[in-house]
Amino acid sequence: MPESLTPELEELAATCHRFARGTLLMADQGDAAAARTAVREAAKAAGLFGMTQPEEYGGSAASQLALCVARETLASHNPPFMDAVFGPSPGVLGSVGEPLKSSHLQPLIDGSKRSSFGFTEPDDATPTSGTVAGDVLVVNGQKSYVTGGADADFINTLVHVGERGPSMVVIDTDTSGVALTQKFSSLDGSHHAAFSFTDVHVPLTNVIGEPGKGLPRAMRQIGDTRLLFAAQASGYMMWVLDLLTEHLQAPDKSGAPRGEKDVVRWRYADLRIKAYAARSMVYRTARLADAGENIVNEAMASKVFTTETVGEVVDTAIQLVGGAALVEDHPLADLYRKVRAWRLAEGASDVLRLNVGRGKLELGKGRI
Ligand SMILES: Cc1cc2nc3c(=O)[nH]c(=O)nc-3n(C[C@H](O)[C@H](O)[C@H](O)COP(=O)(O)OP(=O)(O)OC[C@H]3O[C@@H](n4cnc5c(N)ncnc54)[C@H](O)[C@@H]3O)c2cc1C
């Protein structure tokens, strides 16, 4: 296996295994809100919650490799409430100064405000744009698929500011002219919202970093998130392969182990080979990131390969287990729905493929 971890990271993985078995899998799913609170408190006590948060705010600012180990290990138990384990990270607000530091970053980290990410626009929308008028930016446009948007206090929004270009702008959801136009959930069960912005007056101090430099900042956040998605997808692959191993070692009606049939064995082995390749990509990319390298291409490649592989792993596992795996509430049926969304969230696979190609063909960049 591709991990080759230090004793500290082995210990972190052991902590995550214990946490998943003892806290996540035992959480009372009947009262989801209470379970989330209990998971959060237990995650703080176990030192997991602060891994995503800067030391300045009481977190432990874990390395990318440590974050990948933690996410992959937790996901390898296919537990509920994984989203409650890690504290809110600064994301695009990472290096902001005042006034955004006190007005939005600090409250985000301490949990008194919730943020969301407004990047995607409805197909028929004109791009969200902003015009500078004195010390305000007047924003018009629409965003959709804003995860958690209905409960958010502010949206980190990609806005095209005149000739300066794309900028990330903090827009408070209670600002006049901001309207929540739709709430919906997707196949994986996550919740999203659509917003319209009509002559929304935002203080210029809410522009994150320099106007026109918003896209690289947003892409950096998306790059880190893509790697963590990949680690999580690797963890789910491990869970499915464990389930499948047990299934194939058990006898069928004839009394012979199900995995004795060549065709079944080939398919199983193929999944293991792909899972090994996927996990190797995750670990290599995390190590490159921690060495200070630009991992934009590796993160895209890892995200595409792991999310497509986990889709294939779950799909083939359902085929090998048979109709029982399609019964509502079977863990494989649930996982089938969950992992499907990941080939679109944080960048559609084909769009990421185009970017990897462009990186080499037109920009001459990247190691892939
Ligand atoms: C679970 C989930 C959570 C999400 N959370 C958020 C969020 O918090 N904030 C946010 O802003 N968005 C979010 N999204 C939206 C997500 O980022 C988009 O769905 C994704 O980027 C694809 O964009 P799209 O839906 O507009 O599809 P499109 O861009 O229309 O792409 C659809 C298909 O068209 C083709 N295509 C598109 N562009 C090209 C191209 N340039 N060249 C060739 N082919 C192309 C590809 O085959 C692609 O798969 C989320 C989505 C999901 C599923």
Image (spheres, helix red, strand yellow):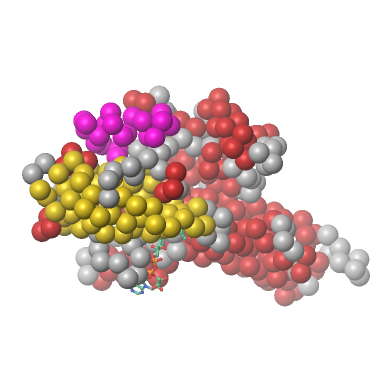
Q: Which of 92 and 120 is in front in this view?
A: 120
Residue at 36% x, 30% y is: 107
Residue at 8% x, 44% y is: 134
306 relative to 194 in the view: left or right: right
Q: Which of 294 and 48 is in front in this view?
A: 48
Asked if residue 48 is positioned above or below residue 141 in the image, the reply reads: above
Majority SS type along the magenta span: helix
Q: Nearer the viewer, residue 32 or 27?
A: 32
Residue 14 seen by the camera = no
- Give the number of marks: 0
Magenta-drawn segment: 91-113
Residue 186 seen by the camera = yes
Residue at 56% x, 61% y is: 187
Q: Most extreme residue toward the bottom, as rendered?
A: 263
Q: Most extreme residue toward the front, as rendered?
A: 176
Q: Most extreme residue toward the left, as rendered?
A: 134
